[in-house]
Image (spheres, rainbow, N blue to C red):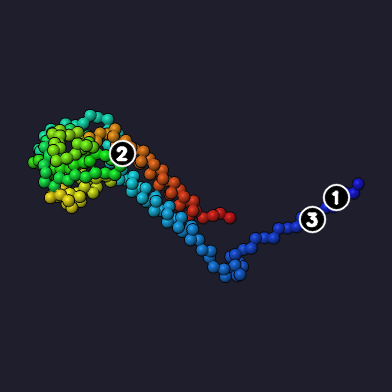
Amino acid sequence: MPSPPEVAELPLAPAPDRASDPEFEAFPEPRRPGKRLTLITLSVTAVVALMLVVSLRGEALYSLTSAPPQNVGNLARFQPDGAQSNHWVRGEGSLGTRGAIRYSRPLEDDTFRLAPVTGNPRLWVEVRVPAGLEGPYFVPPASFVGRLVPATKAGLRHSSLPDWVAEVGDGSVPGDAWLLIDGEAPKSTRWALGLVALFTAFAAFNVWGLVRLLRPIRD
């Protein structure tokens, strides 16, 4: 039986070297609009995610509070300082009407009232009004338990309140004012921990994608 013919192995042609071939050097660099758009999208979304993490930092830290609320007594005489920022406090007082506003939030049936403490214009209180109880005869409570924070650091949900007061109210929120968010206990803000973890992971994923796209390709 005849043996099968031998097949000669031909050497593979070397890959063209663009650096030494003038014809390749004359070609323009390939356009990559898709890659540029991807880089821009990843960069913007990473920055936005980190900004959201920073804006939710206060609520997330507050949700970890385990101590009972601090009793600050009469709110008319209470002058908070930096050591009491983002703390759970309890106090008594009456709310004034000058500059007070009423507002609502999307996806919530309850409404809210924001008013200064009588005798203490540096301290403002946000009160939640249950649905169906809002009206001209609503009487705000005389004692409050909630989160105490400077008005300028109240977070994303309350950052626009001073502007609303100046726009629709008959007063203004001082630049050094404090906000007491009545009814906001640490357990009620634990949703912020989940969002912080989600946005942190999202930012890390986008940064990882940027590193992968910008890393030089090895031969």
According to the picture, the residue beneath numbered tag 1 turns out to be: 4
Could you tell me residue 62's position as x and y percent? Answer: 27, 37
Asked if the residue at tag 3 contacts the one at tag 1, i.e. Cβ–Cβ closer than 8 Å, the answer is no
The residue lying furthest to the left in this view is 119
Judge left or right: residue 50 versus residue 66.
Answer: right
According to the picture, the residue beneath numbered tag 3 turns out to be: 8
Q: Quadrant of residue 117?
A: top left
Q: Secondary structure at mark 1?
A: loop
The residue depicted at 18 percent of the width and 42 percent of the height is 113
Mark 2 neighbour density, 10 Å: few (under 14) some (14–19) many (20 or more): many
Could you tell me residue 89's position as x and y percent? Answer: 19, 34
Q: Nearer the viewer, mark 3 or mark 2?
A: 2
Q: Nearer the viewer, mark 1 or mark 3?
A: 1
Along the line of sight, which residue is nearer the eye, 107 or 84?
107
Answer above or below: position of 67 versus 79: above
Could you tell me residue 201's position as x and y percent? Answer: 41, 43
Q: Secondary structure at mark 3?
A: loop
Mark 1 neighbour density, 10 Å: few (under 14) some (14–19) many (20 or more): few
Q: Nearer the viewer, mark 1 or mark 2?
A: 2
Q: Looking at the image, can residue 148 be seen? A: no
Task: Quote the CA–CA distance across marks 1 and 3.
Answer: 12 Å
- Numbered circle sitting on residue 48: none
Answer above or below: position of 84 versus 43: above
Chain-order first, disc 1 or disc 2: 1
Judge left or right: residue 2 versus residue 184.
Answer: right
What amino acid is labelled 1 in the image?
A: Pro
Mark 3 neighbour density, 10 Å: few (under 14) some (14–19) many (20 or more): few
Chain-order first, disc 3 or disc 2: 3
Could you tell me residue 96's position as x and y percent? Answer: 11, 42
According to the picture, the residue beneath numbered tag 2 turns out to be: 60
